[in-house]
Amino acid sequence: MNQKQKSSPAQYCLLAGLVAGAFFCAPAMAACEGTELTRCPAPFDAQLPDTQKMLTWDQAERVIGFRNDYRNYAGDVFHHGHATPLQMANQPLTQATYQLKGQTWNLQDYIKRQNVSGMLVLKDGKIAWKYLGEGNTDSTLWTSRSVGKSVVSTLVGVALKEGKIHSLNDLVTRYEPDLKGTAWEGVTLKQLIQHTSGVAWNEDYTNPQSDFAQLTQCEAHPGTYDCVRKLVSGLKRAHPAGEVWSYSSGGAWLLGDVLERATGMTLAAYLEKSIWQPYGMANDGVWHAYAKGQHNVGAHGFNATLEDWGRFGEFVLHNGRLPDGKQILPENWVSDSAAWTTAKGSVSAAHPQGIYGYQWWNNEVPANARDVVPAAKTSLKGSMWALGIYGQMIMVNRAENLVIVQWSTWPQAEPSFSAQPLEASLMFSAIAHALR
């Protein structure tokens, strides 16, 4: 069907009822209640966890909360266009193993160790392996957490190509003049996108008084936009701009706000217009809105299906080229996104080239990792990944023509890089070797 003939949720429900019985219709419709979605996500969870306690949810609450983020908060829908189904790979992934501290782990072990609830491997644009657990389905909308930062970064590239943003060397105050006289004065968009603004921000997910915890509390109450803007605009300077890398959801929120002002559109609307429909995503998605139709959150809040997460990874892998051949990202945007900043804090013994770019992370196995296979020297090189707390990921490796998506509910929001993130790097490298 074309866009003008798109079925309503009620029509989908009627069709499903004819096949499966009307018993399933009411829950399906409830999953769409209050949204403009053209397909109702499944499963439907009637009882949702308290959003004010998001950082302390238990494992079961995390699964339900993450696949119902689009219902937990107000959201703006970005609609899909005409999609071509993803094809199955001629060479499916049957097994991949890695070693850590003398023990060998396979895909099934990895799923358990990472609390994986969804995983997709695309090789040469085709499905080499797919896993959906915890009751998740092909219509489940899973929340991105900070994977949304990488989506925003990509949209900044689109805005640059379109001329809506003049240059990454522009000052933030060119787009946000009311921030003159604050700690953000003198900060460039490049410093903002690389998290080297020098503006103080406490991202501690375990501290109920941290800036990030205050942001989540703003999100759980009315007046979210004004609350977060007051928080972000009142921050102090910690370092001179450009000298120190320090991860900041506050800075990422501000980048999203700059993008909305530059384009005159919400993040959801701009994503729909520039990428979601032209690239051929298969399902609608929802972006967490601080004010519906006016402001979406730039730090996280992107919700979409597993396969559409994969399609977004494919869009990045192909340097922003649409199916009709039109390139909507600047020529070197993806390469520049993975040109890791060498500011203090980004470079370490684990990542001597740096760990962070344009809101994408360096996915290489740490150089100082010991007693691991694949070893750092023989592991996958040139990988970039979008990474969100509790284990949300999109990994892109252009040399291998490989995209890997992972949904997880890690017990900790941000474990040590020697724990789950290290194992993810090892498994992704093992998958690349297995598919060569």
Image (spheres, rainbow, N blue to C red):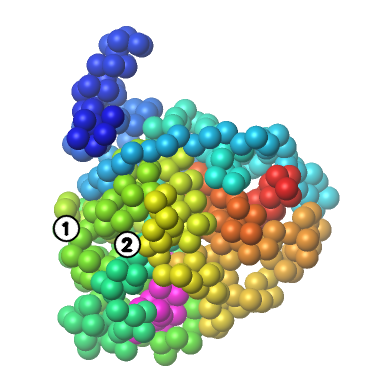
The local secondary structure at tag 1 comes to loop
Q: Residue at x 19, y 35 (%)?
A: 4
Q: Quadrant of residue 339?
A: bottom right
Of the pair 72 and 59, the residue shown nearer to us: 72
Q: Which residue is mark 2?
A: 298
Work out whether residue 253 can be spotted.
no
Work out whether residue 100 can be spotted.
yes
Q: Which residue is mark 1?
A: 294
**What is the magenta range?**
187-203
Please name the amino acid that badge 2 sits on: Gly
Side of 176 relative to 142 (left or right): left
Q: Is residue 305 above or below residue 254?
A: above
- Indicate the position of residue 316 as horizontal and vertical percent values: 47, 58
| Main SS category, magenta section | loop
Residue at the extreme right of the image, as rendered: 102
The label on residue 142 is none
Q: Is residue 296 above or below residue 235?
A: above
**Image quarter in which the N terminus is found:** top left
